[in-house]
């Protein structure tokens, strides 16, 4: 390259760090922190005045987060060549963060809080640019760079629209995926861009970042004919909108209610036909994203998942379940702190199970619960009523004779001329005397039976409400944890063996995951197709290998065949490494450390459960030795009834005998367990064992069984879309 100068200072050109359609970028050894962009000869002349205007406005001094032209660069003859700008180092293009597969490679420590912070910083940078009077215009993923500390920088600033007094230098290029509807399909060479145009592209960029690379206008069209991405944008068909846009989101993706209401409303406004010219500005996004950052909470199922507090469920758990791939990684599992002497290479973290079992088994649990009738102190005297009835009982023979005589007299009276009323009265009184004594005695027997029944019911109630159930549950929970530890210990010892079984497959999967679809040269697959594929979770050769790409709208048999051919070419480059690579050893160590972490958590949980079990056992012992006031009162009543019957010289029935309540075995309360996955801790079902998932032929969502209510198929079952009535897709069973 010819010598280049800034003023009179010669630039010492170092290595080339970038190359594009307009020129090349080189680092400068004698200007650390800066780089030079040299234009191609075909366009250098037309760019000179614009760069001069940007340098004169000192934009580079006012905005450190944007690689604005800092100084003019000329060759030895003083001819304009390009410009010096701030060198953006240790940054990656934004799509490397928003795409889960590349994020795990380039931003392995990034969780969702990191992503939200980056989104916030992007909005701040756009606000700073607009404050200078510039318009970005050509918003695209290659021009937005992110650092490992979540800082954001914009490059290609020389393409921005800038004004110099009455002279306006336009941005003449743009990417369709970020171009607003009102500019779709138009030539941009003579169009004056506005910050409202930028607001649309900014909203698309933020949506893709917050939604795991999903484009807001990529989805399933419910109408007839083609609906390419550019047309969907031109028609304002925001796929995730509450409006009826005639399109459905891809399956297993985010929803607007996964975010704060303000974020959801800003997306609706940015992509609505009713707010052209009034789209949310960058400063409004800064405020809303700050609120989202403050509203994030940690998922109870995965500490790496953060989502808005108002969301009904964790969207990242939902997406991981749908695609069976993690969205975030935890590099912290590479190193786990284990106290000396607590690590065994065969089982992992060592627990003294015998000590825990001894603390559990020392507590004796009865096989049945029996509540005895409490004794009554001293012999009870008969009640006054019983004494009176006994006195009357001794006169009963005379009373019965008198009653019989009166009945005989009443009969004689009926035969004589005595008035009937007198005869009836005499007969009634005689009958009362005859039966009075026996009815009073029977009343005491009924009282005894009532007291005995109440006592039996109380004993049964006490046996059913015994604290033994809590004792059994705590013991069962503790034994469950011990079983879980044993399974984890077994899984720990088998990690390497299991890895070896699928090692070649894992290497192939890892190999395919290293080849992103974005950037690949696949015939007939354009940038719009790549955005559509990403919205359905297809970002690497591995994604396209394990799932059918034709479920993506716009990817027909020809493009699918070309993608398959590309995958085969990638597979042809695969070489199996019999020797364990450092990455494989790290993966094995990671899986083992995840098990160790689970085992350490089980130790704390087991200590807590054993303590709670001992407390429940002590509470049961106190219950056994205590006396129930209600039962004591009922026993007193029964004893009094027995004393009254004895005083009346009647046979006393046997006391009620309530059968003991059997205590169920602890094993009936333990969870039925299956071998856990050593990483996730949940049961693994092989793909062949999974039930067939029925998907809607129109929108790709899950389907549910329904029954037809009318028509020729009334009463017969069919598959109906779970999104009905929004989607009316059906399948026959």
Image: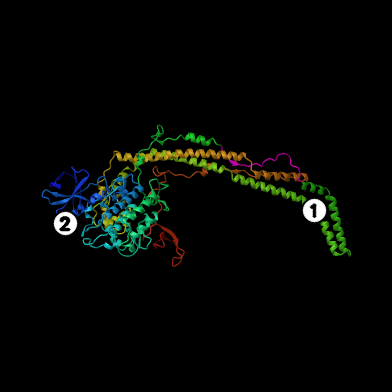
Furthest-right residue in this view = 417
Within 10 Å of disc 2 (Cα), the crowding (few <14, some 14-19, many 20+) is few
Distance, label 2 to label 1, CA atoms, is 129 Å
Task: Specify the principal SS of the magenta part.
Answer: loop
Quadrant containing the C terminus in the rendered view: bottom left
The region drawn magenta spans: 364-383
Residue 467 is tagged as none
Q: Is residue 454 above or below residue 241?
A: above
Q: Quadrant of residue 244?
A: bottom left
Question: Is residue 374 inside the magenta stretch?
Answer: yes
Residue 274 counted in the magenta span: no
SS at mark 2? helix
- x, y percent for residue 511: 28, 46
The residue positioned farthest toward the bottom in the image shown: 711
Q: Secondary structure at mark 1?
A: helix
Q: Measuring 14% from the left and 50% from the top, which residue is drawn there?
A: 74
Residue furthest to the top: 341
Q: Is residue 440 left or right of residue 241?
A: right
Residue 417 on image: x %, y %: 89, 65
User: Which residue: 28% across, 41% down?
Assistant: 577
Which mark sits nearer the N-terminus, 2 or 1?
A: 2
Q: Label 1, on which residue?
A: 436
Q: Which residue is mark 2?
A: 46
């Amino acid at each position: 390259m010819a010598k280049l100068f800034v003023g009179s200072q010669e630039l010492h050109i170092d290595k080339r760090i970038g190359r594009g359609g307009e020129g090349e970028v080189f680092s400068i050894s004698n200007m650390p922190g800066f780089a030079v962009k040299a234009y191609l000869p075909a366009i250098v002349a037309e760019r000179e005045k614009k760069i001069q205007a940007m340098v004169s406005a000192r934009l580079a001094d006012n905005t450190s987060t944007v690689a604005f032209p800092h100084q003019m660069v000329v060759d030895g003859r003083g001819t304009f060549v390009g410009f010096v700008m701030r060198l953006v180092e240790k940054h990656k293009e934004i799509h490397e963060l928003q795409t889960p597969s590349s994020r795990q490679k380039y931003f392995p420590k990034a969780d969702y809080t990191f992503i939200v912070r980056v989104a916030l910083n992007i909005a701040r940078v756009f606000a700073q640019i607009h404050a200078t009077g510039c318009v970005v215009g050509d918003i695209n993923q290659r021009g937005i760079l992110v650092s490992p500390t979540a800082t954001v920088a914009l490059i290609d600033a020389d393409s921005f629209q800038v004004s110099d007094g009455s002279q306006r230098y336009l941005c003449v290029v743009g990417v369709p995926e970020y171009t607003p509807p009102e500019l779709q399909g138009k030539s941009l060479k003579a169009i004056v861009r506005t910050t409202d145009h930028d607001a649309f592209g900014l909203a698309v960029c933020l949506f893709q970042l917050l939604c795991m690379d999903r484009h807001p206008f990529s989805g399933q069209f419910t109408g007839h004919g083609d609906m390419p991405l550019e047309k969907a944008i031109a028609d304002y068909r925001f796929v995730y909108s509450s409006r009826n846009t005639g399109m459905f989101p891809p399956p297993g993706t985010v929803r607007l209610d996964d975010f704060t209401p303000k974020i959801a409303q800003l997306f609706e406004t940015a992509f609505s036909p009713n707010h052209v010219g009034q789209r949310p500005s960058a400063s409004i996004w800064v405020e809303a994203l700050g609120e989202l950052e403050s509203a994030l909470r940690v998922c109870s199922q995965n500490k790496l998942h953060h989502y808005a507090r108002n969301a009904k469920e964790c969207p990242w758990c939902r997406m991981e379940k749908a695609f069976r791939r993690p969205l975030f990684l935890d590099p912290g599992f590479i190193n786990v702190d284990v106290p000396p002497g607590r690590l065994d290479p065969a089982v992992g973290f060592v627990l003294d199970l015998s000590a825990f079992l001894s603390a559990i088994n020392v507590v004796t649990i009865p096989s049945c619960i029996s509540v005895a009738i409490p004794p009554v102190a001293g012999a009870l005297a008969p009640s006054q009523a019983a004494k009176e009835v006994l006195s009357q009982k001794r006169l009963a023979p005379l009373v019965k004779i008198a009653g019989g005589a009166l009945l005989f007299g009443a009969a004689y009276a009926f035969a004589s001329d005595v008035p009937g009323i007198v005869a009836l009265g005499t007969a009634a009184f005689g009958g009362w005397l005859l039966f009075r004594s026996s009815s009073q005695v029977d009343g005491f027997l009924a009282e005894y039976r009532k007291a005995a029944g109440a006592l039996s019911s109380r004993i049964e109630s006490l046996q059913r409400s015994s604290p033994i159930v809590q004792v059994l549950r705590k013991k069962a929970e503790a034994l469950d944890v011990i079983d879980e530890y044993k399974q984890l210990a077994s899984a720990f010892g088998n990690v390497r063996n299991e890895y070896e079984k699928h090692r070649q497959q894992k290497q192939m999967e890892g190999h395919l995951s290293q080849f992103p679809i974005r950037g690949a040269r696949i015939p007939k697959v354009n940038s719009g197709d790549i955005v559509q594929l990403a919205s359905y979770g297809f970002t690497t050769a591995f994604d396209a290998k394990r799932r059918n790409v034709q479920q993506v709208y716009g990817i027909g048999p020809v493009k699918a065949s070309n993608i398959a051919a590309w995958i085969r070419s990638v597979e042809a480059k695969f070489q199996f490494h019999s020797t364990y690579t450092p990455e494989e050893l790290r993966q094995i160590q990671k899986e083992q450390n995840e098990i160790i972490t689970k085992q350490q958590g089980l130790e704390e949980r087991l200590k807590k459960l054993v303590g709670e079990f001992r407390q429940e056992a002590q509470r049961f012992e106190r219950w056994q030795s205590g006396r129930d006031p209600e039962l004591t009162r009922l026993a007193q009543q029964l004893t009094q009834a027995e004393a009254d019957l004895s005083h009346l010289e009647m046979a006393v029935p046997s006391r009620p005998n309530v059968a003991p309540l059997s205590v169920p075995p602890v094993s009936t309360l333990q969870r039925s367990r299956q071998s856990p996955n050593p990483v996730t801790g949940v049961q693994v079902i092989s793909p062949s064992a999974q039930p067939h998932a029925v998907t809607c032929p129109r929108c790709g969502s899950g389907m549910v069984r329904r029954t037809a209510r009318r028509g020729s198929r009334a009463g017969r079952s069919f598959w109906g879309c779970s999104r009905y009535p929004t989607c009316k897709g059906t399948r026959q069973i």
